């Protein structure tokens, strides 16, 4: 029975560990805060273990000091000492009993409590995938916000409350993760940063030989043969017997000689020095995102500036929901963010209390956000959407119901056919790259199961301020909308004719510093026939 019980416990621990290992911790700050509490609990347990060990050592120390005095006295006159019958008895007792007790004390394992707690908490630990995800997030932030490795390594980011820095070992790990993805560009950047910090005297567990090994190969893969040779020679100065480096050096020299011969045969007059001879730089693979450059510029706040003439047409106002009885005496603040497509922001539209309730309802249900596969229609995770989301129905909370009613009153659209309120929390470098909210003509079955038509409009609540990054940008038109807690933005995805407005292609920029919470309501076509009538023109 005992063996069966142990086996059951092991199976249960395995299943729990397996389930938590696939939580994608890095995709949500909300879930990562739980890890902080887990680590704090482990530190408390570790300190308890240290106290227990110190107490144990103190007992042993006292025993040693007592016996030291006793044996010093006894060895000066052994026969005289043992001539006292009590001393003779106590010697027999000590060697027969007390030394055995001391042996048991020394052998006593004080780590049981700590190891037990560690075993329990380990099921909640992130795995290799989470670590790699967090590393890729740093690389994504580096590219999007044009950050150099030294800035990131020193933790010099805007708006940070708790400054932190990367050690040479951290930089080395980032480089290794980039290397496993065949991302030699970032491998070179981070291996060079690790090497720089070691050259500046930082003490680390990682050595220069390991760094140079990765760095030289990454440089070679990018086509810089001269630099690869220089780095390899530096490695061999540190470790002349390094087998791979010796082989690589011979290979690099062979390629160099071949290139020299090829250059001589093609042009006798065109003499090139070793410094000029380089293999062609490998170009990065074609980006799947056509507007990458514009998207990242908008995220940095370097977007297209609206002309003064257009800016003059943007206003702020008190809005009564087109004379909705609820808002005639207490209108809400509204301001124009953009003209085409028209994007409006509602200010002070959701209270801090409502935000906290919505977040608390969502936290237990947060799961890695998915996208609908345009070919299969199946929901799946994607590398270009890094967040966790949960869905809240109006019937389960009066607060959610009240929020839904508010959206309906202010937009004039029927939300009974809308999707549930989606709450999202963005993790490390959390983002959602450029996409459309509505289904295009080549996705006829996108919302077929809902039976409510296409997504006519989007309402987006900002439920937190973000220290840096996290803007909602519209690359087609150059608009950037920045998060502001308690506000909401609204836009139509479809023209009144039902045709999609392709200028509404938008993205959630990576969160550079801070924690981003949003919730959105996708409103569908059904039920809007008399609230937003069709027009005869396709683009009106």
Image (cartoon, rainbow, N blue to C red):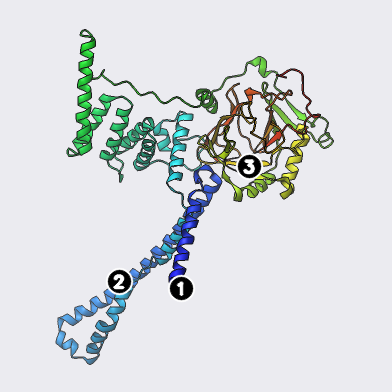
To which quarter of the image does residue 275 belong? top left
Q: Is residue 489 above or below residue 294?
A: below
Query: Residue 511's x, y, as percent?
Result: 53, 36
Q: For the residue carrying disc 2, how many other residues have a C-alpha within 10 Å: few (<14), some (14-19), or many (20+)? A: few
The residue lying toward the viewer, choosing from 52 and 415, is 415
Q: Which residue is mark 1?
A: 1
> At x 46% / y 61%, what residue is drawn?
11
Disc 3 crowd, CA 10 A, few/some/many (<14, 14-19, 20+): many
For disc 1, the neighbor class at 10 Å (few under 14, some 14 to 19, many from 20) is: few
Q: Between marks 2 and 3, how big is the CA–CA gap?
A: 59 Å
Q: CA distance from mark 1 to mark 3?
A: 47 Å
The circle drawn on residue 423 is 3
Camera-near label (1 vs 3) is 1
Determine the secondary structure under disc 2.
helix
Residue drawn at point x = 44 percent, y = 34 percent: 139
Position in image of residue 327 (x %, y %): 81, 35
- Foreground mark, 2 or 1? 1
Indicate left or right for 50 with 230 as reference.
right
Q: Is residue 272 visible?
A: no
- How far across and down, in percent of the image, does residue 498 sit? 71, 25
Q: Which residue matches tag 2?
A: 61
| Distance Cα–Cα, label 2 vs label 1 | 43 Å
Q: Are marks 2 and 3 in contact (CB under 8 Å)?
A: no
In the image, 184: left or right of 363? left
């Amino acid at each position: 029975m005992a063996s069966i019980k142990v086996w059951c416990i092991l199976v249960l621990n395995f299943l729990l560990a397996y389930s938590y290992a696939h939580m994608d911790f890095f995709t949500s700050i909300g879930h990562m805060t739980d890890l902080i509490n887990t680590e704090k609990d482990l530190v408390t347990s570790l300190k308890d273990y240290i106290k227990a060990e110190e107490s144990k050592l103190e007992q042993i120390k006292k025993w040693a000091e007592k016996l030291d005095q006793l044996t010093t006295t006894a060895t000066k006159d052994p026969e005289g000492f043992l001539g006292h019958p009590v001393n003779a008895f106590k010697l027999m007792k000590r060697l027969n009993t007390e030394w055995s007790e001391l042996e048991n004390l020394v052998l006593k394992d004080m780590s049981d409590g700590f190891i037990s707690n560690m075993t329990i908490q380990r099921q909640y630990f992130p795995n290799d995938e989470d670590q790699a995800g967090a590393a890729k997030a740093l690389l994504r932030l580096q590219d999007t916000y044009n950050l150099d490795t030294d800035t990131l390594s020193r933790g010099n980011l805007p708006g940070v409350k708790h400054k932190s820095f990367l050690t040479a070992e951290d930089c080395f790990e980032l480089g290794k993760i980039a290397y496993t993805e065949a991302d030699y560009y970032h491998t070179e950047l981070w291996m060079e940063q690790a090497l720089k910090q070691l050259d500046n005297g930082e003490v680390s567990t990682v050595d220069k030989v390991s760094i140079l090994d990765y760095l030289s190969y990454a440089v070679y893969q990018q086509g810089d043969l001269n630099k690869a040779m220089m780095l390899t020679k530096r490695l061999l100065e540190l470790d002349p017997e390094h087998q791979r480096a010796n082989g690589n050096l011979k290979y690099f020299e062979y390629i160099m000689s071949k290139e020299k011969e090829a250059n001589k045969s093609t042009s006798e007059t065109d003499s090139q020095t070793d410094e000029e001879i380089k293999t062609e730089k490998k170009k990065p693979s074609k980006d799947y995102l056509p507007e990458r450059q514009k998207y990242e510029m908008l995220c940095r706040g370097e977007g297209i500036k609206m002309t003064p003439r257009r800016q003059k047409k943007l206003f702020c106002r008190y809005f009564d929901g087109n004379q909705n009885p609820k808002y005639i005496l207490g209108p809400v603040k509204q301001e124009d963010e953009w003209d085409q497509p028209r994007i409006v922001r509602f200010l002070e539209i959701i209270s801090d209390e409502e935000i906290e309730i919505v977040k608390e309802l969502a936290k237990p249900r947060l799961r890695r956000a998915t996208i609908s596969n345009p070919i299969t229609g199946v929901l799946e995770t994607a590398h270009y959407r890094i967040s966790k989301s949960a869905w809240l129905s109006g019937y389960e909370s009066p607060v959610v119901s009240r929020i839904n009613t508010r959206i309906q009153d202010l937009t004039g659209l029927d939300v009974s056919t809308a999707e549930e309120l989606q709450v999202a929390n963005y993790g490390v470098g959390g983002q959602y790259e450029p996409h459309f909210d509505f289904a295009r003509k080549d996705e006829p079955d996108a919302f077929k199961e809902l039976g409510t038509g296409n997504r006519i409009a989007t309402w987006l609540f900002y439920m937190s301020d973000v220290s840096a990054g996290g803007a909602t940008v519209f690359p087609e038109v150059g608009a950037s909308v920045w998060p502001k807690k308690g506000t909401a933005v609204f836009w139509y995805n479809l023209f009144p004719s039902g045709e999609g407005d392709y200028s509404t292609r938008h993205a959630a920029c990576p969160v550079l510093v801070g924690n981003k919470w949003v919730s959105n309501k996708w409103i569908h076509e059904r039920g809007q026939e008399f609230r937003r009538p069709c027009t005869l023109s396709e683009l009106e």
